[in-house]
Image (tube, helix red, strand yellow):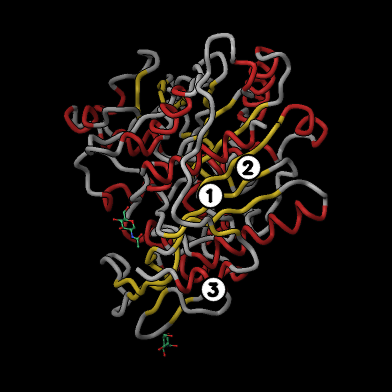
Amino acid sequence: MSSTPLLRLLHFLLLLLPAPLHDYCFPRLSSGGLDVYHPLILFAGFGCPDLEARLTEAYTPSVPRCGALKGKGWFPIYKFNTLDLVEHDYVPCFQEQMALVYDPVHNKYRNLAGVETRVLNFGSAYGFSEKQMVPDRENLCLVSLRKELEAVGYRDGDTLFGAPYDMRYAPPSEGYVARVQKLVEHASSKNGDKPVILVGHSFGATAVLGFLTSTPLPWRNKFIKHLLLISPPPPTGFTLTITQLTSGPSVFQIATVPIMELRPLWRTFASALLTMPSPVAFGHKPLVITKHRNYSAYHMEDLLLALGFTADQTLPFLRRRTLEVEAPLVPTTYIIGGGIKTPEQLVFWEGDFDVPPENVYGEGDGTVNMASLLAFGKELRRQQERNNVHFKALAIANATHAGIVLEEHLLRMVMTEILQANR
Ligand SMILES: *[C@@H]1O[C@H](CO)[C@@H](O)[C@H](O)[C@H]1NC(C)=O
Ligand SMILES: *[C@@H]1O[C@H](CO)[C@@H](O)[C@H](O)[C@H]1NC(C)=O
């Protein structure tokens, strides 16, 4: 794949790292050397947090079988290994109990009546797991990065933490901000009041950004040393968000269940509509092409209606805050991949949105379109610089959305940035 268009696009915005890469070189911590480092909190990607559920008397199952766990306390509902759900024929119940209900009056999402949910292992860097037994995929949930951090002396519960979230909500979900604030304060006080480094990958970057921008600026200035956003899904949107609505959620999988079966559930999530492509990044370019009609980023409401959303169901999209990029206003490093062919336009020629589209590819990280990564980075930079807050952007050629935290040489670059943030 040629990286020439990437280089052209990046020239004023981003600093492209030279190849060959330099090995990072820093002292491994000896015991007693921990005061060298700032405490660090990880925010892994979309499918990584584990969720538990509890069914109360208020729950009315659509089929009696789904009420079997009523009154029986907390049970794992979205957790490694999701094959259990399949083996116990629980997938239809899972779909019902994981669904969110949108309340148009208060513009809020909530669980189905009688279903309570909670995130497992909040606070731990071990609180993230892959949900599928796919070889080499466990590392998607920042496992490799965690191991690298441990190799330089970071320890879970002492200097290293994790802030799993409920991925169904557009972050932050209710209660999350206060909870992470407490975790940050705990991490800091445990480490001689040193401010904390926050590292988010993919949707974890969305979560950490949503968290930070909901806190008072003086609090941020006191407690946050640095923020690293790695391959964040930009609020300016990307085309794959549409594909997930038509063909099922590739980011929210359950062992052996075809993703198309999870489409109705997926469409209830607040997060499903969060990154619809916006005109800021895509202008008038047709993103969905049929023989009778094209849809650009200006026509996303019409598209949702064409996909079978009711007018009420499009409300959260119309009311979303996404186009307002809000910079964190703490020292930030923005790390993205690029130079990978990425679906940009979707052709559903016959207008049948239930069949997989034919992709027309453009530039990106394989998941997110470069136009949007650049638009987002540019706006972050503008706001940070206007407020005299440090902002560094790195685009790594030939790095995919997930590969950036999986492949050794890329991980090394990420580690270099983390260690630099420690200075
Ligand atoms: C849709 O977009 C395609 C690609 O840009 C273009 O060739 C076609 O004429 C457009 N069709 C309609 C109906 O506007
Ligand atoms: C791009 O990355 C892939 C996977 O790591 C590697 O096999 C390939 O050689 C790389 N290509 C270039 C041009 O660096």
Give the image location of residue 190, x and y in percent.
65, 12
Label 2 or label 3, whichever comes before in sequence order: 3
Give the image location of residue 107, x and y in percent.
63, 46
- Residue beneath label 3, please? 8
How many residues crowd mark 3 within 10 Å: few (<14), some (14–19), many (20+)? few
Element carrying mark 3: helix
State which quarter of the image contains the C terminus.
Answer: top right
Q: Which amino acid lies under the numbered mark 2 shown in the image of this protein?
A: Leu
Is disc 3's CB within 8 Å of ligand 2?
no
Give the image location of residue 244, x and y in percent.
38, 56
Q: Which amino acid lies under the numbered mark 1 shown in the image of this protein?
A: Pro
- Residue beneath label 2, please? 209
- Residue beneath label 1, please? 232
Element carrying mark 1: loop
Mark 2, mark 3: which one is toward the viewer? 3
- Alpha carbons under labels 3 and 1: distance apart: 21 Å
Residue at image coords 56%, 13%: 158
Residue at image coords 43%, 22%: 126
33 left or right of 214 in image: left
Q: Vertical placement of 263 versus 364: above or below?
A: above
Element carrying mark 2: helix
Residue at image coords 54%, 30%: 26
Pick the residue in front: 14 or 174: 14
